[in-house]
Each structure stands twice: as structure tokens, then as C-alpha cells.
Amino acid sequence: MLPVAGRPFVEYLILEAARYGFKRVTLLAGRFGEQVQEAYDGRVINGARVDVIIEPEPRGTGGALAYAHALGALDPAFLLMNGDSWIDMDLTVFVQNWNAYQREESGVFAQILLQSVPDSGRYGAVETAQGRVTGFREKTPERAGQAGQINAGVYILSRAVIAEIPTEQACSLEAEVFPRLVAAGQVAGVAAPDGAYFIDIGLPVTYAQVQDEFVAQRTRPALFLDRDGTLNVDRGYTHDPATLQWQPGARAAIKLANDRGYYVFVVTNQAGVARGFYDEDAVRQFHDAMQADLAQIGAHIDALEWCPHHVDATVEAYRKDCPRRKPAPGMINDLLAFWPVDMARSLMIGDAETDMAAAKAAGITGVHYKGGSLHALVLDHLK
């Protein structure tokens, strides 16, 4: 719950999981767990539902996970993030790597994200060979100043690993579980990109450091995209995932923007809700299908905004002149208020004049999509 740049640090971690498509986030809380529960239990943040589990007594990292497993909170494979560190890593790619190991039936039961640092002595180093973790070196004064790879605090684990931990027993993943898995050759190591920003706020000096640099590190340009007619074929009030058909080069365009370090946002009018043709759950299901398709190529949309309102709505609850409905800039402005966006390098691409008007009103560049390869258009305009 420590604040960083005006927001609890844990909330940035929730946002990271959500922007990469995770729909359920479980916070494992210990001391002061009631505060965490009051702040986050049951909330939905950027499309991800947050649940809080409070361990009844201190049980260590492994013991807390075993308790969560006993409550039915763990998926067959799950992402695990430390609560006091943050790294700029595309988690879609991290998951892709895990899925590749599982398809190969390689015997990998855990995967650790690794960060290269100039001084591994401060953290303790992780040794690897041919993509597998082979050992851990504790932090010692003798290793001060030596470059190496460290544990970045992000993992994917098989639930089977946690099932072997006694439910009411204290257990450390780092000291007890991982060494056993490493000895059996069952832990993969995935390196973060060179130069990826990493911060561990566990020390006073790094906690002070993050206050000054975190917003700047998260600030990046954004690619705003219309949906129907731009990303997918517009079939008229499109809402059925079974009818999802991407425009030429659309998925590749999103992947390109991801790889260039852009946020990718979708802003779409969904008057079909106001007219009673479908409900907002149908909108969410269509977006889930888009994200699932994108994940297959290691791509993602960071946030999807829609306006279900219309002045001529047949559903009374949605009948209003909404400032979020394009050509008004409300959806874009809401995203700009929530995410640290470099507006000067951002752009909006859409197939309608309302998209161009919304972009102009929000103060960002508008680019009219007139068919053809969306990838080629994005490639021409990313700065």
C-alpha cells in the first residue's frame, strides 16, 4: 500500500496484469491485510476483478500460495508477481514463452523473469544454461559490482507445485521450493529485454528514487484505435465473437505498436447497447475474443473504452447525450487522465469523420483509415 506518485504501488501491479489481458487478480495479504481488503476486494480495475485473500498467520510465500490453493483461488497455471518490484516487460510475451514450453511437454513447472543488472551482489544472482535456471547465488559483499542476472519478481507457476506444499505449513518459494525444482531442471529463465526499467522499492533509497522517476518511465505515446470498420469488419452492430473478422494487417498493427513501446487503446461507440440489440456483457465478450486472438501473436490492447449511450436510445437507461460518444472526446480524455501519455507523439486512427473530430477535440493527431493494410498505415505514422 506504499504510495508511489500518488497511487498505491500495488495498484500499478494490478494495472500491469490487467493491461496484458489478465481478468482476475488475487492479492495475497498478510500484515495490514484488512487495509488491502477494504481498498481493493471486489473492485474491477481496467477490466480485471480484484480479490483479496488474507493469510491467517505469516506462512511465507509458498505457504500463502498453499492457503490460496486450498481456497480454490489458483488456476492450473498462474502468473505471480512480487508486491514490491516492477519491471517494464510485455507479459504477453512472457506467457507465450510458457505456453511454448507446455506444448513441448518440456517438464517446466516454473518460469522466472530475469533482469540483467550491473551489480548483482546487491540482489543475489540467478545462473542459467540453455534457458533453464541452474542455480541461485546469495547476495554477498564479494559479488558487489559484478554484473549478472537477478530474479525480477515475476513468475509463472504450475498449480501442481503449490499442491505439494502442506496447507498449514510455513514455506518459502525462494528457499525451499525453487531449489528443488532447479535441481530437477524444471525451472525456465526468461530474460527481460536489454535496458528494461526495473525497480525494487524494498529499500529507502530505491523507494525515494521511484518517486522521482516512475511517472517518466511509464509515460509513452499512445495509439488510439476505432473498433468497427478499423480493427474489425463492421457487420452492423457487431457484437458476436463468432463473427470477429480482423481488417487486413490489424493484428500486426497492434503488435507493431506494442513492440515500439506505445500504449494501444480502443475507443468505440456501441449504440447497439442503447438500441437494445445486445448488452454490455456482449461488448466485453467481443473484446475478450479480440484479446485472445491478439495473445496468439504476442500482442495486446492496453485498455478498451466504449460508449453505450445514444440520444435516440430505445433502452431508457442509455438515452442521453453522452460526452464520451464520438465525435465528443470523452473516451480519449478519460484515457489521457488515467494513463501517463505522451500526447505529442500520440495518434488516433479511425474510419469515420467522428473519429477525426474526437481526435482533434482531444488535441491528438487524427489519421483517417480508408481500407487496406492497417499495419502499413500504422508503420507510416508511428514516430
Image (cartoon, rainbow, N blue to C red):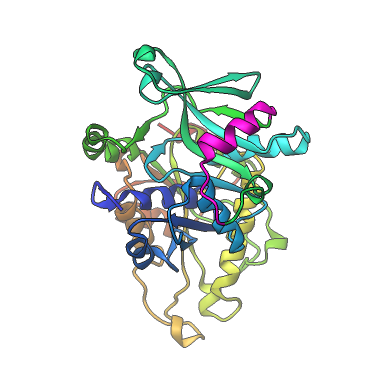
Q: Is residue 249 left or right of residue 49?
A: right
- Is 180 within the magenta? yes
Q: Position of residue 355 (x, y in %)?
A: 43, 56
Q: Is residue 142 left or right of residue 108?
A: left
Work out whether 21 lies above or below 119: below
Nearer to me, 175 or 326: 175
Residue at 59%, 38% (x, y): give it.
Answer: 177
Residue at 63%, 28% (x, y): give it.
Answer: 182
Q: Quadrant of residue 305?
A: bottom left
- Magenta span of residues: 168-185
Task: Evaluate whether residue 31 shows in this view.
Answer: yes
Work out whether 97 lies above or below 12: above
- Count the marks: 0
- Is 198 within the magenta? no
Which quadrant, please, contains the C terminus?
top left
Task: Evaluate whether residue 90 shows in this view.
Answer: no
Q: Quadrant of residue 23?
A: bottom right
Name of the residue lying farthest toward the front = 169
Residue at 58%, 64% (x, y): give it.
Answer: 71
Nearer to me, 148 or 144: 144
Q: Quadrant of residue 254?
A: top right
Q: Position of residue 28 (x, y in %)?
A: 46, 55
Work out whether 31 lies above or below 253: below
